Amino acid sequence: MPGLSATEATARLKAEGFNELPRTGKRSVVRLVLDVLREPMLLLLVAGGAIYFALGDLGEAALLLVFASFSIVITVVQEARTERVLESLRDLTSPRALVIRDGERIRIAGREVVRGDLIVLSEGDRVAADATVVECDDLLLDESLLTGESVPVRKLARAAGTEAGPPHTGGDDLPFVFSGTLVVRGSGIAEVTSIGIRTEIGKIGQSLSSLETETPRLQLQTRRLVTTFAVIAAVVITLTVLLYGLYRGGWLEGVLAGIALGMSMLPEEFPVVLTVFLAMGAWRISQARVLTRRASAIESLGAATVLCTDKTGTLTQNRMTVARLILPDGSQTAPNAATPPAPAFDALIETGVLACAPEPFDPMEKALQALRPDASAGWKLARSYGLRPDLLAMSNAWRSTGDTCSVAAKGAPETIGTLCRMSEGELDELRSRVDALAQEGLRVLGVARADGDPDGLPESQRDFSFRFCGLVGFADPLRAEVKDAVAECRSAGIRVVMITGDYPATASAIAEQAGLDHARILTGAEITSLDDDELARAARGQTGFARIAPDQKLRIVNALKRDGEIVAMTGDGVNDAPSLKAAHIGIAMGGRGTDVAREASSIVLLDDDFGSIVKAIRLGRRIYDNLRKAMSFILAVHVPIAGLALLPLLTGLPLLFGPVHIAFLEMIIDPVCSLVFEAETEERNVMKRPPRAPDEPLLPKSLVVWSALQGGLALILCGGVMVTANAWGMPANEVRALTFFSLVLVIVSLIFVNRSFTSSLIEAFTRPNRVLVLIVIFVAATLTLSLAWPAAAELFRFGPLHADDLAITVAAAVVSLVLLEISKYPLRRAMAGEFDHHQDSAASPLR
């Protein structure tokens, strides 16, 4: 075969372009920063820092701008990572290729391969383009890159004068090879049919570039919350300035009062706390060998309702083992390290090993050789007979030192039976045994042996007088931790759906072993006949998927999302990248996963352990629960801060709190105290409640009411202290210090109130939390410093406080703590009712 001429190749290269994926227009760092700054939360941080800077509060301005810069850097780094997805694909699609042009074999860059080229395939080559095999000799390819299945597939040449039909990945005895796949055995020549974006891997690249990553729900909810507060604050600032200027005549004082009041209402802490919680959450999850590439996925983890997982390497060990040995008389054994096979099976094992390549690559041959590594000792390979389109078996003829010859064969059981010249009745019995093993999810090979003449070996395997030795069943065993992890998912209300490219019988057997409730297995062929709505209905309930093509994985994920599910998707191959990116939580395998899959995902399992996914979900729920506690606490704290800033305007009392006091409370005391909740341990039944509803707000009504109750009581207590102190004629500086101290101690009391809603007050104090101890010490030291250090006392305009004054501030905190603890009992049932339809009431993050 002469192949294309150099002139034809050049013309096609000019007309159709290079065999590569198009380069995407990369965004510059400046563009990424500008895109990030469109987020209202970051704008609020930057704007707040600018306001503090304009007011001369350089410390507070610097602190706020540092937080903003930190958030921007993290976001830009993550966005830049996602820009590399298609670049990883480009690397996979640019191997060098050996082509036949003008009758000569020349090696060229993979990007220069054109449609119609004849490419030469040899063991170890990565295929440069999609092609149809026209000649081959025992050709075996690893297509796991596209199918996710680790077992290599056998290729046959296209019959002369026939059309090959539409190409598709997976399945044995097809004439199609695909760009990026690997030749693991044999050789062949294939005619290129598609290049660049028209290849299967190119179509995946196109799909990836067209997919938009969804904005995380937590980010949307926080954005709405912050925007609402910002609008209210803007209105209040305007009214305050107008009223103060019109009724008191002090426009400058009115502006200062308006800024202080507006700052007391703006929830600057929300984005700060969100950033810290997600960053700390990513660190905690990394301790479970799970790398978080996008921090927003942590929140989604706790809400996942469906976990889509592939079979090979995730549920199973991605390692073929010999699971069953069956002798011709029907006796069988399941070999393992603890109980080696009985001597009766020695001949079957030895023959199976001798039928393998001396240095095998095929996983099944490796598994056989592991049973008897020294089986070929004393034998020398005389001749090999490879697979043929009309004979799905391979044989090795071995010569011993005594100059005898033995021939070992393995292959499709029916083919081996035919070589052994079985009768029709014997073949029927063989088929029934094979079918029974297939129902257990085993891949089955037949094994036979014959004697040969070392000096006159025939040209065909058919010419030997084979004796049937038995059957060998192979399995990719289930990971030890999978069954318990699936059970934990079920108790947490998470449905585990298996999506595999393997055969339905294998999928069904593994589903049963893993404890999955798969009443039916849908195949790729069945999915093809369903429209999107029908697929969404079919995907509900106890369903698994087998023989699934790459584009169908994406359809399944989108169908589940359309049905209202929060979808987590695992994957490792290039074929998984679009579905990983489309899912709410894409989970890539770090050990065996491709760069493309890792770049498209939001979470990477460093140990490829299915149990790690469940640990991550548990941590995701804990983090969200604690974040909700912190948000409730922050909302409660804003009530007395805003109220104490507003009270002088309503009562005619002198202004006590200025911007420096509000900034100190909201940027130091409040966020620091919120960190206590990040370190809180998980609720006892965090994995025994259903996932929260997708439309459940970050702060539901019950939490808002509870926060308002806490904040209202704190305002009454601190406001009472301020009004009473004024009535007693205390100097303004002392009133300011007394009120400020009372407020800070009441804020600390709210930490203990919000640690748990169901536990007792004693447990709130004794439940271990080292961060709480550190923060109580920090607050005490800060308050002491603000009084004892003259420069700090002058900055805050604090007067001296005596022992009886300090006793009043402590009393306010104790009264707040006791009254709120008592109020939990009548409110508990009403507040739990808000969550009963989402989760177990005892597990609410309030509690």
Image: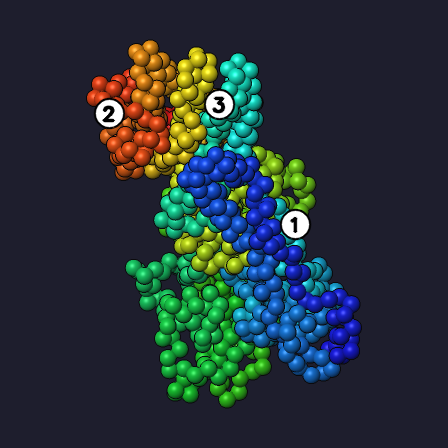
Q: Nearer the viewer, residue 387 or 120?
A: 120
For the rendered model, the colour scheme is: rainbow
Give x and y (percent) for residue 513: 43, 47
Residues at marks 1 and 3 touching, judged by CB atoms closer than 8 Å: no
Image point (73%, 69%), residue name: 115
Q: Position of residue 639 (x, y in %)?
A: 43, 21
| Res 765 visible | yes
Q: Residue at x 67, y 60 (%)?
A: 22
Disc 3 target residue: 253
- What number is the disc on residue 510? none
Number of residues whose C-alpha sits closer than 10 Å to that of mark 1, classed few (under 14), some (14–19) or many (20 or more)? few
Mark closest to the chain's N terminus, 3 or 2: 3
Badge 3 marks a residue whose secondary structure is helix
**Which dot marks residue 762?**
2
Q: Nearer the viewer, mark 1 or mark 2?
A: 2
| Mark 1 in CB contact with mark 2 (< 8 angstroms) | no
Residue at 53% across, 22% down:
251
In the depicted view, which residue is nearer to us: 200 or 49?
A: 49
Q: Is residue 606 above or below residue 215?
A: below
Residue 685 position in % (x across, y down): 36, 32
Image point 78% across, 78% down: which residue? 7
The quadrant of the image that shows the N terminus is bottom right
Q: Nearer the viewer, residue 370 or 30?
A: 30
Task: Tell me the CA gap for discs 1 and 2.
Answer: 55 Å
Question: Which of the marked residues, 1 or 3, is nearer the chain's N terminus?
Answer: 1
> Label 1, on which residue?
210
The local secondary structure at tag 1 comes to helix
